[in-house]
Image (cartoon, rainbow, N blue to C red):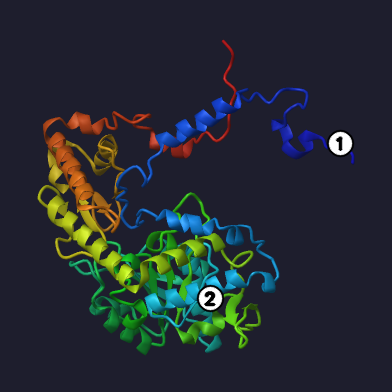
């Protein structure tokens, strides 16, 4: 094989092969200690409460990790023949049935690799449904309290976004939809509970209005952890929805993947579901079905992120129906406990019974000059990760707090005490809050500069 000229591949940034790479020379113990030290600088749910609203950063049972690492699952080749992966196919089949029961749908596609891709898949199925009927509506209704990815999913499917407001009480009202609901509407996308943590109590009425126009209802299932066991989106009029398994069913969250965002759907959308589907034969064996001529096609390589499915199935089996209901009850109880306790000091945006999360803001800080971002940074000094800040956008200076069902009352009280202390500091010694954090490995960073001029390469420091 002829030698390859490095400059032909890498241009002027090519390194002369005769030169050393300039990487630090360290022993194995030094390298290992370096990465352990870096890990200790990070915050994780294993360290303390992680009240990141909308994202549901709850504790994941370690038994799920054990199950996903069982050799029979972990060592499967993704293209192994069907007769050698019957156990994996049975797990996928059972997981689909369990998820369908939880959300009140007829079937569930497990293939999407994330909640956002599941959202995309749902809209692809809606588009295919309309096309099969000879219709080509152009618009999708999206309330201002929806999740941000809704707009992107619509754009990818060639739909025009039609935003509409929520009421002063934070939920969508039928009269807000009526003026924009016409024959050119393909669907409405609605998050329930919505992004301000409130239950969309008018959803059945809204669904009937949408269906009467020949359109469909897409339900953003990101906040299912506030409903499971108590209400099913399919029973409320939703035709298709995505699950965020990392939020509700304790699979790993973030880090660029691998994720899993199954899509539940009603029977009318079954012909358009992604391929392959897992089917059970008359002889009790399982197989992958590709022969679905109206399908939107394959969404990713292989059949989905199987390890995430194992974790989610382990959680379903571990919890059972009563356990899922109990998790919902605790998530809602914890959020309302924080709403009441934080409301003694902080301004609560919608001071009514919430679901799994509550929105507060920095309104009472007024002339102190302390902002929501300052509060978030100061929380790090008290041992807590910050809540979601400046979101939802409909609340100025918002802090979206989600305690999840896995936190104890004692943990919630410590969080309330920290927030109360920061409020006092903001009024009595505001500079302490403005210059936070003080106790972390790194102090306050220039986030604008980090975003615009990131350092992505190792550069050897000059000697001397």
Residue drawn at the location 23% of the way across and 70% of the way down: 171
Q: Nearer the viewer, residue 121 or 109?
A: 109
The quarter of the image holding the N terminus is top right
Residue that label 1 marks:
3
Q: Nearer the viewer, residue 294 or 339?
A: 339
On residue 93, the disc is 2
The local crowd at label 2, few if under 14, some if 14 to 19, many if 20 or more residues have their Cα within 10 Å, is some
- Pinpoint residue 441: horizontal percent, then vertical percent: 37, 29
The local crowd at label 1, few if under 14, some if 14 to 19, many if 20 or more residues have their Cα within 10 Å, is few
Q: Is residue 340 left or right of residue 437?
A: left
Identify the element where label 1 is drawn: loop
Residue drawn at the location 21% of the way across and 69% of the way down: 167
Q: Is residue 299 visible?
A: yes
Give how far apart the Cα atoms at labels 1 and 2 are. 51 Å
- Pinpoint residue 276: horizontal percent, then vertical percent: 61, 75
Rendered image quadrant of residue 4: top right
The quarter of the image holding the C terminus is top right
Q: Nearer the viewer, residue 205 or 34?
A: 34
Q: Nearer the viewer, residue 153 or 122?
A: 122
- Closer to the camera: disc 1 or disc 2? 2
Residue drawn at the location 21% of the way across and 50% of the way down: 412
291 versus 241 height, above or below:
below
Identify the element where label 2 is drawn: helix
Looking at marks 1 and 2 on the same chain, the residue that comes earlier in the sequence is marked by 1
236 versus 261 height, above or below:
below
Rendered image quadrant of residue 140: bottom left
- Pinpoint residue 311: horizontal percent, then vertical percent: 47, 61
């Amino acid at each position: 094989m002829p030698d390859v000229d490095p400059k032909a591949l890498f241009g002027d940034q090519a390194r002369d092969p005769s030169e050393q790479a300039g990487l630090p020379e360290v022993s194995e113990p030094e390298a290992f200690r370096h990465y352990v030290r870096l890990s200790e600088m990070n915050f994780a749910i294993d360290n303390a409460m992680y009240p990141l609203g909308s994202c549901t950063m709850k504790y994941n049972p370690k038994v799920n990790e054990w199950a996903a690492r069982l050799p029979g699952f972990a060592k499967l080749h993704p293209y192994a023949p069907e007769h050698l992966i019957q156990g994996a196919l049975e797990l996928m089949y059972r997981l689909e049935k369990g998820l369908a029961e939880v959300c009140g749908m007829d079937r569930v596609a497990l293939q999407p690799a994330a909640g956002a891709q599941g959202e995309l898949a749902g809209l692809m199925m809606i588009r295919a449904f309309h096309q099969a009927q000879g219709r080509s509506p152009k618009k999708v209704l999206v309330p201002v309290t929806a999740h941000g990815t809704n707009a992107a999913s619509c754009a990818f499917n060639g739909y025009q976004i039609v935003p509409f407001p929520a009421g002063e009480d934070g939920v969508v009202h039928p009269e807000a939809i009526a003026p924009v609901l016409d024959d050119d509407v393909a669907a409405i996308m609605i998050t329930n509970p919505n992004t301000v943590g409130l239950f969309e109590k008018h959803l059945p009425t809204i669904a009937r209005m949408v269906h009467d126009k020949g359109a469909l209802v897409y339900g953003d299932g990101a906040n299912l952890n506030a409903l499971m066991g108590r209400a099913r989106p399919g029973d409320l009029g939703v035709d298709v929805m995505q699950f965020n398994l990392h939020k509700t069913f304790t699979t790993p969250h973030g880090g660029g993947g691998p994720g899993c965002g199954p899509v539940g759907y009603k029977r009318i959308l079954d012909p358009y579901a992604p391929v392959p589907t897992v089917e059970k034969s008359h002889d009790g064996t399982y197989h992958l079905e590709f022969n679905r001529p109206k399908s939107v096609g394959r969404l990713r390589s292989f059949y989905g992120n199987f390890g995430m499915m194992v974790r989610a199935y382990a959680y379903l089996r571990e919890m059972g129906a009563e356990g899922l209901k109990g998790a919902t009850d605790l998530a809602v109880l914890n959020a309302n406990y924080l709403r009441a306790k934080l409301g003694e000091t902080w301004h609560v945006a919608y001071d009514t019974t919430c679901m799994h999360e509550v929105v507060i803001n920095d309104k009472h800080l007024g002339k102190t000059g302390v902002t929501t971002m300052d509060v978030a940074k100061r929380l790090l000094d008290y041992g807590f990760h910050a809540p979601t800040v400046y979101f939802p956008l409909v609340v100025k200076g918002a802090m979206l707090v989600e305690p999840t069902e896995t936190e104890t009352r004692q943990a919630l009280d410590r969080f309330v005490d920290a927030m109360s202390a920061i409020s006092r500091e903001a009024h009595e010694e505001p500079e302490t809050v403005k210059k936070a954090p003080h106790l972390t490995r790194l102090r306050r960073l220039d986030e604008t500069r980090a975003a615009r001029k990131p350092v992505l390469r190792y550069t050897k420091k000059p000697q001397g």
